[in-house]
Image: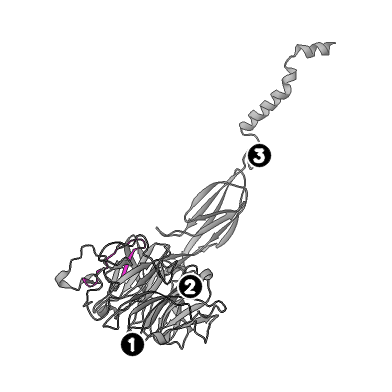
Amino acid sequence: MRHLLSHFSRPWLPLLPLLLACCLALLAACGGGHDDDPPGATTGDLTISIGGLPAGVAGAVTLSGPASYSKTLTASTTLTGLVPGAYTLSAASVAQGTGTLAPTPVTQQVQVNAGATASASITYAATAPLALALQEVASGLSAPIFLTAPPGDSRLFILERPGRIRVLQNGTLLATPFLDISPLTTTSGERGLLSMAFHPQYASNGYFFIYYTNLAGDIVIERQQVSAGNANVADPLSALTILTIPHPTFSNHYGGLLSFGPDGYLYAGTGDGGSAGDPSGNAQNTNVLLGKLLRLDVNASTVAQPYVIPPGNPFAGTPGTRGEIWAYGLRNPWRYAFDIPAQLLYIADVGQANWEEVDVRPVGQAGNNYGWNIMEGLHCYNSSSCNQAGLVLPAIEYAHDTAGGCSITGGYVYRGTALPELAGQYLYSDYCSGWLKSFSYGNGTPSAVTDWGITNVGNILSFGQDAQNELYMLSGTGKVYKVVRK
C-alpha cells in the first residue's frame, strides 16, 4: 500500500524516460561521444599542398574519389565536405618556358574520414630543358608541299606539288595515290597542287577540298569525295569546282592554304598576284580576291551554287567589293593556322626583300588590313603612301640579313600531347635556312622566341599536322620529318 501511495505521490515518475533522453542529448551537445567520429559528422576535409611552382605557373593535379568525384587542382587548397573514403591524387608535369617541372609523387592515395581533415602534398621540381629533333617518317617524295589528316584518322595525307596526294599508312607510303591531278597542273614558278582540307564531317560525307593552279595559272578551289569502296582512293568523277580566281601575268605568289575554321567555314589564303611590290595593287583592292584571306560556306555546295557568303564577312553586300573577303593586305600568306584553344589566327606572310612576318589576331575578328604593300613587316615599303592608320602590324618579324632567311614558312601552334613543354608555342621555319623556331603569344604580346637548333634538313616547304595535333616538317629533299623529343 505504501508503494502504491509512493507511486501516486511522485507524479514525475512517468516522465523519467523522457528526462533521461534529454540529458543524453545535452551531454552529446556538450562534447560527448568519440573524438575521431563525432556524432552527426558525415563528411571530411582534405588539405592538398602543391609546392615548387614558380609564380604564374599552375600545377596539374587531378583528385578522384567516391561517387565519381573528380576535381582539377592548380595550386594548394583545402577541400571541404568530402564523402568519406579513399581518394587518389594524380599529378602531371607542367611546362615552364622550354623546360618541364615534374611532380613527386606522381600518384598517391589518401583516406578521408568523417569529421576529420586529411592532408597530402605534391612537390614540383625542374627537369632537363626540352630539346627537339626531327624524325624521318617518309622519303622519296616529289616536292612534298603539305601534310594533313582527317579528324580521328591515323593516316597521313601528303601532297606532292606536281599534283598527287599520297597516303602514309602504318609507316608505309602506299604506291597508289589517293588523288592524282598531275595532268591538270604544272610546277612552273610557284604553281602546282598546294594544299587540301578535309571537311569536319569527312567521316560521314567523304568530302575534301583541294587548292591548286590550273594550266592557265589560275587558282582553283575544288571539292572532291572519297570513293565508296576504298578509303585510300578518291572518286575521280566527284570533282566540283568551288571557285576559280584569275591569276594573270606572273607565276608566283599563290598563297595556297585551305583550312576549315572553328566556325565550320572554309578559309583560303591567296597571294597578291606575283612580281615585286604588288604592281597591280591587288592586296589593298577589296574588289579582287588576290592578296586576301577568303571565307566561304561550302556546307551545301551544288553545281548551281558552289558556295555562299557567310554572315559576318566584312564586305558582304557592299558595292564594289567582294563578299568572299575576310581579311586583306597580304603579300603571300604561305600558311596560316587557327589555334582554337586560344581563339587566335596566325598568318605567316612572306616578305618582299628584307622582312618576314607573323600576324596574330583573334579568330573572329573580320576585315583586318595586314598592310601590304604599304608596309613590309613593321617598316614602310611604299614610302610615298606610308599611312599606317587602321593597319594590323605583325606580332613578330625577322630580317633577311640577321636571321639568315629569305621566305617564312608558317607552321602551327603546338597542341599535341607528346611534348607538353611546347604547348601553346607557334612553330615556324624559313625556306632558305631550314631552321626551326617558336614563340609564345599571350595578352597581345609575343614572347620567348626560341631557336631549336634544327639544321641540315634542306629547304622547308611546309609544316603539317596529324589528327593527334603532332607536327611535321616537309623538306625539298623529298623527306617528311616529325617533330619529336631529342
First to last magenta residue range? 358-374
In-front residue for pair 108/140: 140
Q: Secondary structure at mark 3?
A: loop
Amino acid, disc 1: Ser
Tell me whether the residue at label 1 lies in contact with that at label 3, contact meaning CB atoms closer than 8 angstroms: no
Earlier in the chain: of badge 1 and badge 2, it is 1
Mark 1, residue position: 188
Amino acid, disc 3: His
Where in the figure is residue 142, as x and y percent of width and height? 42, 87
Where in the figure is residue 259, as x and y percent of width and height? 41, 71
Mark 3, residue position: 34
Earlier in the chain: of badge 1 and badge 3, it is 3
What label sits on residue 249 in the rendered view? none
Measured Cα–Cα span from mark 1 to mark 2? 28 Å
Q: Secondary structure at mark 1?
A: loop
Residue at the location (55% across, 63% down)?
Answer: 106
Q: Residues within 10 Å of mark 3 (few under 14, many from 20)?
A: few
Quadrant in the picture for the N terminus: top right
Where in the figure is residue 341, as x and y percent of width and height? 43, 62
Relative to 395, 202 lies left or right: right
Helix, strand or loop for the magenta stretch, by majority: loop
